[in-house]
C-alpha cells in the first residue's frame, strides 16, 4: 500500500494549480483559519505535517511564526523551498515519514491540512496521531483537516475528469470499499503527447466519532469540529471535517 511514495509529483502539483489550490487569496484565507482554530500567537513554533509545496508553511512564516514543514515528497519540498526563497522567508523543511517522526514536545501547535491523514493502514494512521500528539506540548492544540466522510458517501461519483490548459486529461475512477472504509481511486493521466500514466490513490475515511475516539487514545481531547475554513459548525452536508484537539 505504498501508493503515496511517488504520487506527489509534478502531475499532482499541476492538478493542485489547476483546481485553484495555489491561489494566493485562498492560501491566505486558509491560513487565517489555521491561526484562529489553533489560537496561534506570533512567534509560536508550528509543525505542518505533510506540508507539500509549502502553501501554508510559507504563509505562516510570513506572519511571524517559526514553522517546520515535514513531507515525504522531495519534489514538493523543492517547490516549498523555492516558494520560501521567492517570498524571502526562512522555514525548516524536513524530508521524512510522518509514521516515524520523533519530535518530543517541541511545538506550540501542529496540523495536518487538506486530507493529509488516512494514507496508511489503521494501525499506521493511529501511529501518526500519536506522533503528532507527542510533538506538541501539554495544553497545546493540533488540527486534523479531512474530507467530510458523510459528504463523500452521499456524493461519491464513480468517474470524474479534468482537462488542463495544455490539453492534458486527468481522469479518476472512484470506488468505496465498505469493509475497509477506504476510497480507492484509479487515475489515468494523458499528457499532450498522448502518453498514458496510470496510478492509484487509497485513503481511509473516518467518521467524527472514530476520529475523536482515536485522538483521545493519544491524549488529545476534542475542542471543536468545523465544517469548513470559515469556522462554521460541522454537519452532514459540510464540505470539510476539521477537528481541533487539545493535548491533556
Image: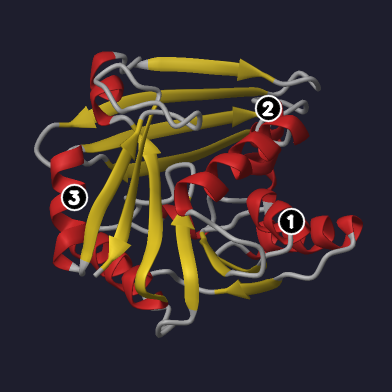
Please tell me how crowded label 3 is: few (under 14), some (14-19), or many (20+) other residues with Cα within 10 Å.
some
Residue at 64% in and 32% down: 15
In the rendered view, tell whether residue 103 sits above or below residue 2: below
Q: Is residue 71 left or right of residue 181?
A: right
Residue at 48% in and 42% down: 114
Q: Is residue 61 left or right of residue 209?
A: right
Looking at marks 1 and 2 on the same chain, the residue that comes earlier in the sequence is marked by 2
Closest to the observer: 197 or 174? 174
Query: In 3D space, how far apart are the residues under numbered discs 1 and 2 (Cα atoms)?
Result: 22 Å
Q: Determine the secondary structure under disc 3.
A: helix
- Which residue position is annotated with label 3? 212
Closest to the observer: 118 or 11? 118
- Which residue position is annotated with label 2? 20
- Which residue position is annotated with label 1? 63
In the rendered view, tell whether residue 65 sits above or below residue 134: above
Q: Position of residue 175 (x, y in %)?
A: 28, 26
Looking at marks 2 and 3 on the same chain, the residue that comes earlier in the sequence is marked by 2
- Name the quadrant containing residue 178: top left
Q: Position of residue 56 (x, y in %)?
A: 64, 51
Closest to the observer: 44 or 184? 44
Q: Is residue 122 visible?
A: no
Q: Position of residue 115 (x, y in %)?
A: 42, 43
**Closer to the observer: label 1 or label 2?**
1
Amino acid at each position: 500500500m505504498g501508493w503515496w511514495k511517488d504520487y506527489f509529483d509534478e502531475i499532482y502539483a499541476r492538478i493542485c494549480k489547476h483546481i485553484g489550490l495555489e491561489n494566493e487569496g485562498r492560501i491566505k484565507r486558509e491560513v487565517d483559519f489555521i491561526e484562529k482554530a489553533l489560537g496561534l500567537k506570533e512567534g509560536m513554533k508550528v509543525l505542518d505535517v505533510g506540508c507539500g509545496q509549502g502553501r501554508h508553511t510559507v504563509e505562516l512564516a510570513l506572519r511571524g511564526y517559526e514553522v517546520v514543514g515535514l513531507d515525504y515528497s522531495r519534489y514538493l519540498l523543492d517547490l516549498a523551498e523555492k516558494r520560501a526563497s521567492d517570498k524571502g522567508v526562512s522555514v525548516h523543511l524536513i524530508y521524512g515519514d510522518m509514521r516515524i517522526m520523533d519530535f518530543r514536545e517541541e511545538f506550540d501547535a501542529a496540523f495536518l491540512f487538506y486530507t493529509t491523514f488516512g494514507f496508511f493502514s489503521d494501525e499506521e494512521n493511529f501511529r501518526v496521531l500519536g506522533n503528532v500528539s507527542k510533538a506538541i506540548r501539554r495544553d497545546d492544540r493540533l488540527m486534523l483537516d479531512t474530507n467530510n466522510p458523510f459528504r463523500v458517501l452521499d456524493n461519491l461519483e464513480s468517474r470524474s475528469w479534468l482537462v488542463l490548459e495544455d490539453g492534458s486529461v486527468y481522469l479518476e475512477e472512484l470506488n468505496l470499499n465498505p469493509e475497509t472504509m477506504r476510497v480507492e481511486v484509479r487515475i489515468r493521466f494523458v499528457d499532450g503527447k498522448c502518453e498514458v500514466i496510470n496510478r492509484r490513490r487509497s485513503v481511509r475515511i473516518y467518521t467524527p466519532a472514530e476520529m475523536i475516539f482515536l485522538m483521545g487514545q493519544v491524549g488529545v481531547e476534542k475542542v471543536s469540529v468545523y465544517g469548513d475554513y470559515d469556522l462554521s459548525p460541522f454537519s452532514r452536508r459540510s464540505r470539510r471535517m476539521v477537528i481541533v484537539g487539545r493535548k491533556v
